Amino acid sequence: MRTGLNPTLQRLGWRDLFEQSLPRFADVPGVLGRVRAQHRGGYEIACEHGDLPAIVEGKTMRGWDGASLPIVGDWVLVEQLSAGGAVIRALLPRFSKLARRAAGGGIEEQSLVANVDLALIVTSLEQDFSPRRIERYVMMAREGGVSPVLALSKVDLCPDPLPAIEQARAAAPGAPVLLLSTLQLQGVDAVRSLLHEGQTMVLLGSSGVGKSTLLNALLGRQEIAVGEVRSDGKGRHTTTHRHLVPLEGGGVLIDTPGMRELGVLAQDEQAFDAFEDLDALMEACRFSDCQHRNEPGCAIQGAIQSGELPLERLQAYQKMKAEADWVAAQRDARARADSKGKARRLSRELQATLRRKGRV
Ligand SMILES: Nc1nc2c(ncn2[C@@H]2O[C@H](COP(=O)(O)OP(=O)(O)OP(=O)(O)O)[C@@H](O)[C@H]2O)c(=O)[nH]1
Ligand SMILES: [Mg+2]
Ligand SMILES: [Zn+2]
């Protein structure tokens, strides 16, 4: 039986909505499982047989669109082989996905986690607090169809958290903001209560902000190693891979390593929902083609003057728009080059065939 009435699958975050896709995979061998981790050598799949090490053969995998192989959080059909080991046979459609631009300034997409409901964006009040970084995480979440929640961590090390709370609110309008001091167990219950049965929450944020410490506190055991923070305040990249853990009493967590670079794709208008407050203001500008520089009746400039809108937030928005345009232009150029290349190849092949047949 493959359905979600299976308690193992329920514990892993199985949802009724996945049932709809099952008929498509009726003839695929194997059992349902969820990707817990991805290593260099393969995957770790949680299923009714426990945690199985598994590999994927892309070409034989059903439901694969050729772009994104399984990632942590994905639901798959996995077949145990009699010779030992297991193979992922099918990839179920996702309801959400977090992705970023691969590190190094390129335009390639790197998928991070799938089928998550909430993204807990953890920022330390001790290290360099950055509303701009929060904005990028929020964009990534919104673009992927994931609800952002902000957690300001290590409050115990910050005498006055109020300014940071205000900056965080401005950077992520509408997102809940929680204060955390995991070492004092402050805020841990608040995080727990956000995560409902069957939901999955991913922990995001720079290295050393306390993601793994929080996960351990929520689990009530040392599941994941945590690191010392160096005296310069920089984390040490203690967590090295994404890792999914079901919680007692419902809900699933995914721990991630701190990211050094966060290039946002922003190829979907949804990403700019992160700047909804600016959209609302722009609609109130007197001229519909207002450039928000020094036009009379500009609501954006008005909000900056009154202190309602931080100037840096407008600049961040303009920078993100420019970045998104750049990525889109690069992709277009590549798509055009690809199709030109393909056309050239085809015409060469055709000419070769004609030559063979002695027609040219
Ligand atoms: N003072 C204080 N320290 C904390 C708190 N939470 C975590 N830490 C410390 O911060 C350090 C880093 O914590 P980790 O949980 O390893 O951080 P991480 O976000 O998982 O880091 P990466 O795995 O490198 O991405 C550890 O030494 C923790 O003890 C807190 O609430 N207050
Ligand atoms: Mg960690
Ligand atoms: Zn304007």
Image (cartoon, rainbow, N blue to C red):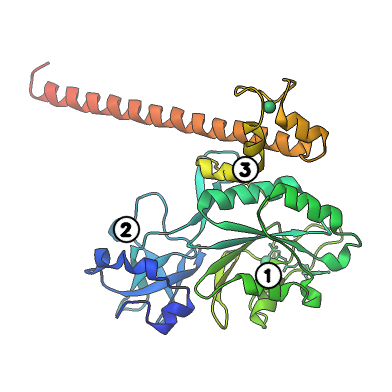
On the image, the x and y values in percent for residue 272 come to: 58, 42
Q: Amino acid at mark 1?
A: Ser
CB of residue at label 1: within 8 Å of ligand 2?
Answer: yes
Judged left or right of residue 253, residue 19 is left
Please tell me in which quadrant of the rendered image residue 193 appears.
Answer: bottom right
Q: Please, what secondary structure does the residue beneath circle 2 have?
A: loop
Judged left or right of residue 75, residue 206 is right
Residue depicted at 84% across the width and 59% down the height: 126
Q: Which residue is mark 3?
A: 276
Q: Which is nearer the N-term, disc 3 or disc 2?
A: 2
Q: Of discs 3 and 2, which sits in the foreground?
A: 3
Residue depicted at 56% across the width and 35% down the height: 324
Q: Of discs 1 and 3, which sits in the foreground?
A: 3
Q: CA distance from mark 1 to mark 2?
A: 32 Å
Disc 3 packing (10 Å; few <14; some 14–19; many ≥20): some
- Nearer to the camera, 135 or 291: 291
Residue depicted at 53% across the width and 48% down the height: 143
Q: Which residue is mark 2?
A: 63
- Nearer to the camera, 20 or 233: 20
Q: Please, what secondary structure does the residue beneath circle 3 have?
A: helix
Q: Please, what secondary structure does the residue beneath circle 1 have?
A: helix
Image quadrant holding the N terminus, namely bottom left
